[in-house]
Amino acid sequence: MTLRSQLLKGILEGCILSIIGQQPTYGYELSLRLQGFGLADVSEGSIYPILLRLQKEKLIEGVMQKSESGPKRKYYHLTPEGEQALAEFIHHWETIKQPVDRIIEKGGDMS
């Protein structure tokens, strides 16, 4: 497993919660949106197990809806627990991201 995939594995769930939090989304659309943000190496095969786990944890719910083209699709939306999990992810991400950004910018120089 590459370093990029290891890093991504740790944050992909939060990214998925964030996208679903913006608007109800179905699996393939989620894949396209992640790719649109520059995560082209995230496959549908990586997304669906996360969606299943998030459903089991009651952080998202899936509702079958008619599609304008083709069969019905399962659209996912956040539950109140999912909204809380997303808020926690964002908080924890910021507490990690800011110090790492400072370390990278300063090359370890604390002055």
Image (spheres, rainbow, N blue to C red):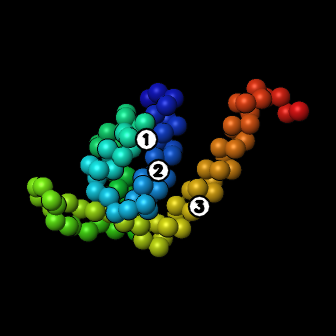
The residue singled out by tag 3 in the image is 88
Q: Using a 10 Å C-alpha cutoff, classify the residue at mark 3 as few (fewer than 14 neighbours), some (14 to 19) or many (20 or more).
A: few
The type of residue carrying mark 1 is: Phe
x 34%, y 63%: residue? 24
**Residue 6 appears at what percent x and percent y?**
49, 35
Percent from the top left, x then y, of residue 8? 48, 39
Task: Name the spot of residue 2 as percent of width and height, x first.
Answer: 47, 27
**First-in-chain label (2 vs 3):** 2
Coordinates of residue 74 in the picture (x, y in percent)? 24, 62
Q: Which tag is nearer the camera, tag 2 or tag 1?
A: 1
Mark 2 and mark 1 residues within 8 Å of each other at the beta carbon: yes
On residue 37, the disc is 1
- Alpha-carbon span between mark 2 and mark 1: 10 Å
In this rendered view, identify the residue nearer to me: 54 or 72: 72
- Element under disc 3: helix
- Residues 5 and 23: in front is 23
Q: Which residue is mark 2?
A: 15
